[in-house]
Image (cartoon, grey):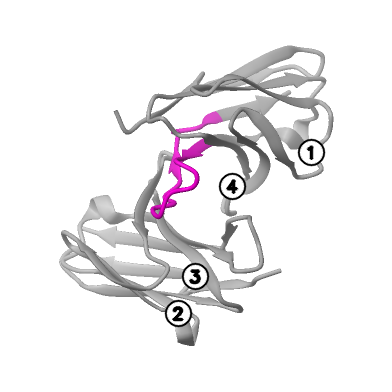
Amino acid sequence: DTEVTQTPKHLVMGMTNKKSLKCEQHMGHRAMYWYKQKAKKPPELMFVYSYEKLSINESVPSRFSPECPNSSLLNLHLHALQPEDSALYLCASRLFGSKDEKLFFGSGTQLSVL
Amino acid sequence: GIQVEQSPPDLILQEGANSTLRCNFSDSVNNLQWFHQNPWGQLINLFYIPSGTKQNGRLSATTVATERYSLLYISSSQTTDSGVYFCAVVGTSGSRLTFGEGTQLTVNP
């Protein structure tokens, strides 16, 4: 299994809604990431979890709340988002601490905030 | 932080043509990866190549770390090669993957 699975694929939410994005991998990877990508731009790092602990928060607004329940799962809880938060949200994972540091991405959640 | 420049920004090819994409970086790196993002948004890892040469089918990559550049070669291009190609690096003094702005490749039938 070499996949990172993200759900849902598409999400439309109002500014007062609460929703969650989910990410799952079964490759034994111990580093997991959330990225945000706007159209025609490269991905921007939001959060990194290493061994289920938050190791990097790139000064992301508190309306985005990450959670890593176990080594295979990563969630991103969304609350009171703004229209400018509309973007493709990508989850990624890597083995961590190996010679081959390839980063594997999920297919993303396309988020629209109305 | 480290700077990553990719060229060309846009490239249009006819099916069957060959192409070379370039990635320049401003400092020493211990991690360099090439990704392909297809038109549906999926980012596929093509190569992990901080130095040396690798080949995978019609794709190959070479990184000359001492001269701070990497090249991605696509031979006999197909329409399914269309999309954005990103180079991303981690500098030896850093910990985060820094992406270039990408090369938008369009392969016409």
Write down the residue under mark 2. B65
Image coords of residue B27 (percent x, y): 60, 78
Q: Is residue A36 above or below residue B7?
A: above
Q: Is residue A97 above or below residue B108?
A: above
**Dot 1: what SS?**
loop
Residue A96 is a magenta residue: yes
* Gap in angstroms between the C-alphas marked 1 and 4: 19 Å
Tell me, yes or no, whether the two marked residues, 1 and 3, touch with CB atoms within 8 Å: no
N-term mark: 1 or 4:
4
Q: Nearer the viewer, residue B101 or A26?
A: A26
Q: Quadrant of the N terminus of chain B?
A: bottom right
Q: Is residue B35 left or right of residue A63?
A: left
Residue A5 image-quadrant placement: top left
Any mark on residue A60, and which? 1
**Alpha carbon distance from label 4 to label 3:** 15 Å
* Picture disc at residue B9: 3
Residue at x-position 47% and y-position 85%: B66
Q: Is residue A81 above or below residue B94?
A: above
Residue B73 visible, this angle: no
Q: Nearer the viewer, residue B71 or B31?
A: B31
Foreground tag (2 vs 3): 2
> Please, what secondary structure does the residue beneath circle 2 have?
helix
Tag 2 near tag 1, CB within 8 Å: no
- Residue B22 lies, with reference to residue A48, above or below; the image says below
